């Protein structure tokens, strides 16, 4: 017979063993509980619009992880049952522009959800939706830009105690060009004469500088990183990106022609709380009816989408209309930013809208400027039509159902690089109509921001185009 002490020791060892097994099992369960589950795409559908289709879906993630660059693919078939289904080559964006052989086809949109950290969920395809109506009249753009000339203004030139540089926005009115500088230490804009002779820029002459008295209350309370300028009924309207990293809000304000503050526009809250640093109000343009202004943010809001990725991206911007009387935003439409031209290779890779120009009612020339070791600049035609969704009251575009404005490429600056100084296009930030040519066509001038040479040699480029309308 074993002594009592023996059985007591056996009992303690048994209890300890059971406790250890329970602890290990609990740890295993906790580990399983903490395992990150893949994201999912639900409510995948197709909306057929004028000239293009838009894919819609809802992104979900059990842990609330942010969406990364989800993958998209378009398919077409002969009917809604998917007869003769084929994958459409190079159709890997959220929107798909119709092609001539799509007439009468049914389209499906496939989403592969991707978390920001790269984890991928299962692919989900929408039902086939039809039918596509292809308008042959849309095959050829109704406008084109013809390159005429380039003029480079020397870097570091002084004018009335200021250094000419940082040229970020331009507006033409009554023979004068108004050009804003993004020097936040001395915010200002210039009046400039651009002499055009025989389809070439003969001279660029700075004639006046207007500075903003930073002792005035509004200017003191805002960080004036001025990016765009327009004139409206004798007043000057200017946009500022502020400084998001320093909790300084972006703004749009008016001044008189001496630089005195007059009024500020009421900015929707989502721009004030979800903008990315150095990615806010780069653009302004007067509406055709002169009753309002259009403005677009340079980069997507953090609640709307990611910064541009490669080879696909979900990066919607907000094309916003402000009434110049009430100073209120009254309508907003989504503009889908193009993907990066190359795979990401540094933290400085970016693509964004640096300016826009209204050329017809609800039609715009939009400048997209990407940087990946060099500048890649393109001009698109964007159109708001009766299928475009007003997203004024939609605070978050991630997973929201909406149809963006249509867009088509009008001009790629890589086509003229060999004709430019140093065979390169620089940091294009401004676009405006200019004077009318003898043949009756309007000119367009774009300008570049040399960043005051902070990042090496850059150019103050003035590039002249002829706008040809078909």
Image (spheres, grey):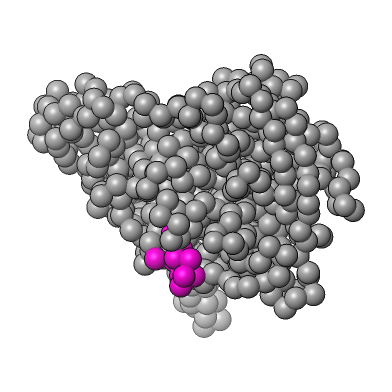
Residue 263: horizontal and vertical position, in percent? Answer: 59, 73
- The residue at the far top in this view is 418
Q: Which residues are magenta?
A: 321-330
> Residue at horizontal 67%, vertical 71%?
261
Q: Quadrant of residue 418?
A: top right
Q: Quadrant of residue 243?
A: bottom right
- The residue lying toward the viewer, choosing from 166 and 77, is 166
Residue 305: horizontal and vertical position, in percent? Answer: 46, 52
> Residue at horizontal 31%, vertical 54%?
389
- The residue lying toward the viewer, choosing from 278 and 39, is 278
Q: Is residue 268 visible?
A: no
Residue 241: horizontal and vertical position, in percent? Answer: 64, 59
- The residue lying toward the viewer, choosing from 431 and 433, is 433
Position above or below: 61 against 223: above
Position above or below: 369 against 41: above
- The residue at the far bottom in this view is 4
> Residue at horizontal 68%, vertical 62%?
257
Queried whether the magenta region covers residue 36, the answer comes back as no
Relative side of 8 to 405, left or right: right
Q: How many marks?
A: 0
Residue 387: horizontal and vertical position, in percent? Answer: 26, 49
Queried whether the magenta region covers residue 323, the answer comes back as yes
Q: Quadrant of the C terminus?
A: top left
> Residue at horizontal 40%, vertical 33%?
408
Position above or below: 320 against 223: above
Q: Is residue 212 visible?
A: yes
Relative side of 343 to 421, left or right: left
Relative side of 348 to 147, left or right: right
């Amino acid at each position: 017979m074993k002594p009592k002490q023996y059985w007591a020791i056996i009992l303690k060892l048994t209890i300890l063993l059971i406790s250890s097994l329970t602890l290990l099992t609990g740890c295993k369960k906790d580990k399983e509980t903490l395992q990150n589950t893949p994201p999912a795409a639900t409510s995948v559908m197709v909306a057929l619009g004028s000239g293009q289709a838009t894919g819609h879906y809802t992104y979900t993630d059990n842990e609330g992880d942010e969406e990364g660059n989800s993958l998209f693919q378009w398919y077409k078939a002969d009917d809604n049952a998917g007869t003769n289904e084929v994958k459409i080559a190079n159709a890997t964006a959220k929107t798909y522009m119709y092609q001539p052989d799509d007439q009468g086809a049914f389209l499906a949109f496939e989403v592969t959800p991707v978390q920001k950290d790269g984890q991928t969920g299962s692919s989900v395809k929408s039902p086939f939706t039809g039918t596509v109506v292809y308008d042959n009249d849309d095959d050829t753009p109704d406008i084109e830009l013809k390159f005429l000339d380039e003029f480079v203004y020397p870097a570091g030139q002084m004018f009335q105690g200021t250094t000419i540089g940082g040229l970020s926005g331009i507006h033409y009115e009554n023979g004068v060009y108004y050009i804003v500088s993004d020097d936040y230490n001395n915010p200002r804009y210039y009046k400039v004469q651009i002499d055009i002779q025989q389809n070439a820029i003969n001279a660029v002459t700075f004639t006046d500088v207007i500075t903003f008295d930073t002792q005035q209350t509004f200017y003191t309370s805002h960080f004036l990183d001025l990016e765009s300028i327009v004139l409206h009924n004798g007043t000057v309207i200017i946009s500022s990106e502020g400084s998001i990293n320093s909790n300084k809000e972006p703004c749009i304000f008016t001044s008189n022609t001496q630089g005195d503050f007059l009024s500020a526009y009421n900015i929707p809250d989502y721009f004030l709380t979800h903008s990315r640093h150095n990615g806010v109000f780069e653009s302004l343009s007067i509406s055709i009816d002169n009753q309002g202004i259009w403005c677009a943010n340079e980069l997507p809001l953090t609640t709307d989408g990611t910064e541009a990725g490669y080879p696909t991206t979900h990066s919607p911007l907000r094309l916003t209309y402000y009434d110049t009387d009430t100073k209120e935003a009254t309508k907003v439409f989504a503009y889908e930013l193009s993907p990066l031209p190359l795979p990401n290779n540094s933290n400085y890779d970016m693509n964004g809208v640096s300016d826009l120009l209204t050329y017809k009612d609800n039609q715009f020339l939009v400048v997209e400027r990407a940087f990946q070791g060099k500048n890649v600049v393109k001009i698109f035609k964007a159109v708001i039509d009766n299928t475009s969704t007003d997203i004024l009251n939609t605070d978050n575009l991630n997973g929201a159902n909406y149809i963006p404005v249509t867009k088509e490429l009008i001009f790629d600056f890589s086509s003229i690089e060999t004709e430019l100084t140093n065979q390169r296009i620089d940091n294009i930030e401004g676009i405006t109509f200019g004077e009318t040519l003898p043949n009756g066509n309007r000119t367009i001038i774009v300008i570049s921001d040399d960043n005051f040479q902070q990042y090496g040699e850059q150019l103050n480029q003035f590039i002249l185009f002829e706008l040809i309308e078909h």
